[in-house]
Structures are given as structure tokens and as C-alpha cells.
Image: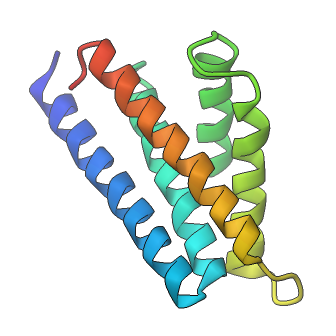
Amino acid sequence: MDELIKKKLQTIILKSERSLRIADGLINQGDYDVACSRAYYCAFYIMEGLLITKGLEFSKHSSVMGAFNKYFIHSGEFPKDLSKKVNNLFGQRQIADYDFEEIITEEMALEDIEIARTILDDGKKYLLDNGFM
């Protein structure tokens, strides 16, 4: 495997892990909207990393999510129910970052963090099992 790709994946994993740590810390401070946003980015970064293993890179969030569904969920690499969870993460991140009427509750943020943690853990396992780490 190309060393440049391996290094990029390592950087992506670190960024994803950092976003998750920040999300966890923000829960304790009561910043549920920002925690939700960081949880989404944790998942988003690792999905980008996984797509790099297929030679794919995208600039739009919707393209990353669509390609992740196609290449990792529909292929059976990740569970089918993850598609809905990723869409929920994205929707709640939109609320957290741009909506001034709806609020993100602690329960919503905690659920988002667990989904992100699962995607990160499963993504790292995939990368390890397939020789990318």
C-alpha cells in the first residue's frame, strides 16, 4: 500500500478520535449541540478514510454518505441499520449547527456519540483487518 495513503489514514483516524473525545467532554459541560456536531464529524472523517481505501474522495457530505452506503453498507461490510443512523447523525448535526428553534438534548447527543463511536471502532477494525493500518 502507498505510504502516503497510510499516513493520510493515520491522520484521519487521529482527527476522528479527537472529535469523539471533544464530544465526550462537551457532554459534561452541557454543550449538547456542539457535542452532537463533533460526534457527526467523528463519523464523517472515518467514513472519508474508509472511502480512500476504495480510491474515492468527495468534497460534499452527501456524496461521502452516499458512497459509504454503496461501498460499505450495501456491500455488507457494515450493518444495514447504520445507514439510517448516519442519516440521523447528519440531520442532528444540521440542527445543532444551523437551527435556532430546535434544540439537541443530552439524550440525542449521547446517542450520536455512541453511533459515532461504533462507526469509528468498526472503521478502525476494517482498516486493520484489511491491511490499511
Query: Residue 58, can we see it?
Result: no
The residue at 74%/80% (across/down) is 98
Q: Is residue 10 left or right of residue 129?
A: left
Query: Residue 114, can we see it?
Result: yes
Q: Position of residue 99 (x, y in %)?
A: 81, 82
Colour scheme employed for the rendering of this structure? rainbow
The residue at 78%/59% (across/down) is 91
Q: Is residue 21 left or right of residue 74?
A: left
Q: Nearer the viewer, residue 6 or 104?
A: 104
Q: Quadrant of the C terminus?
A: top left
Q: Position of residue 61 (x, y in %)?
A: 62, 50
Q: Nearer the viewer, residue 84 or 99?
A: 84
Q: Quadrant of the N terminus?
A: top left
Q: Position of residue 97 (x, y in %)?
A: 67, 78
44 relative to 6, above or below: below
Give the quadrant of residue 34.
bottom right
Q: Position of residue 55 (x, y in %)?
A: 39, 21
Q: Is residue 21 left or right of residue 69?
A: left
Q: Residue furthest left?
A: 3
10 relative to 15, above or below: above
41 relative to 107, above or below: above
Give the quadrant of residue 46.
top left
The residue at 65%/39% (across/down) is 65
The residue at 66%/79% (across/down) is 33
Q: Is residue 103 left or right of residue 45?
A: right
